[in-house]
Image (cartoon, rainbow, N blue to C red):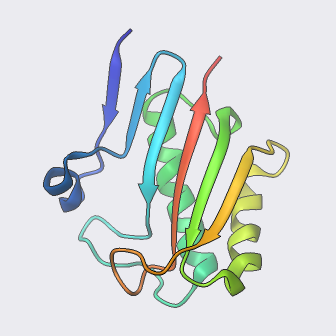
Amino acid sequence: MTRQNVFTGVPWEEIVGYCRAVRIGNTVHVAGTTAVDSAGTVVAPGDAYAQTAYILGIIVKALATVNARPSDVVRTRMFVTDISHWEAIGRAHGEVFRGIHPAATMVQVAALIHPEMLVEIEVDAFVE
């Protein structure tokens, strides 16, 4: 099987030694994704909905790069710094995955890599 790696050019990919997504065969794994633009700036500080929507946009683009779609996603994991934002995060998640219904997890964590980051999301997909 061929391995496809998707890089987005953020500085952490080289420093940490990872990529945004990996596809091997029919399986796609998208790494934990935060609301950071190509310059490394956190997008929409303080706005959990906007950060989630931005993150999901990055994820959808990464999936498309390896010929996968949101409808191929079977699992999402959402790491949030304040669980009281669950409704805003869930609303943005639902805008992408309503009708698809992947298995989903949302947990509160103590912190993410930057204090302005409120959400980090990873997904797994299976492409038929």
- At horizontal 28% and vertical 43% (from top left) the residue drawn is 7
Quarter of the image where one finds residue 11 = bottom left
Task: Please tell me which residue is depicted at 57% across the width and 39% down the height of the picture.
Answer: 124
Query: Which quadrant, please, contains the N terminus?
Result: top left
Number of marks in the rendered image: 0
Q: Residue furthest bottom?
A: 46
Image coords of residue 59 (percent x, y): 50, 50
**Residue at the spot 43% in from the left edge and 80% down from the top edge:** 111
Q: Answer left or right for 4 relative to 109.
A: left
Residue situated in front as seen by the camera: 104 or 63: 104
Q: Where is residue 126 in the image (x, y as percent from the top left)?
A: 61, 26
Asked if residue 79 lies left or right of residue 94, the reply is left
Q: State the image quarter where residue 4 is shown.
A: top left
Quarter of the image for the C terminus: give it.
Answer: top right
Q: Is residue 62 left or right of residue 124?
A: left
- Taking depth in this image into account, of 100 and 64 the one nearest to the observer is 100
Counting from the top left corner in percent of width and height, residue 9 is at: 23, 53
Residue at the image position 50 percent from the left and 31 percent from the top: 28
Which residue reaches farthest left? 15
Q: Residue 19, position in %: x, y?
A: 30, 44
Above or below, comparing residue 119 to residue 123 in the picture: below
Asked whether 83 or 98 is in front, the reply is 83
Q: Quadrant of residue 95?
A: bottom right
Residue at the front extreme, as displayed = 110
Q: Which residue lies furthest to the right in this view?
A: 99
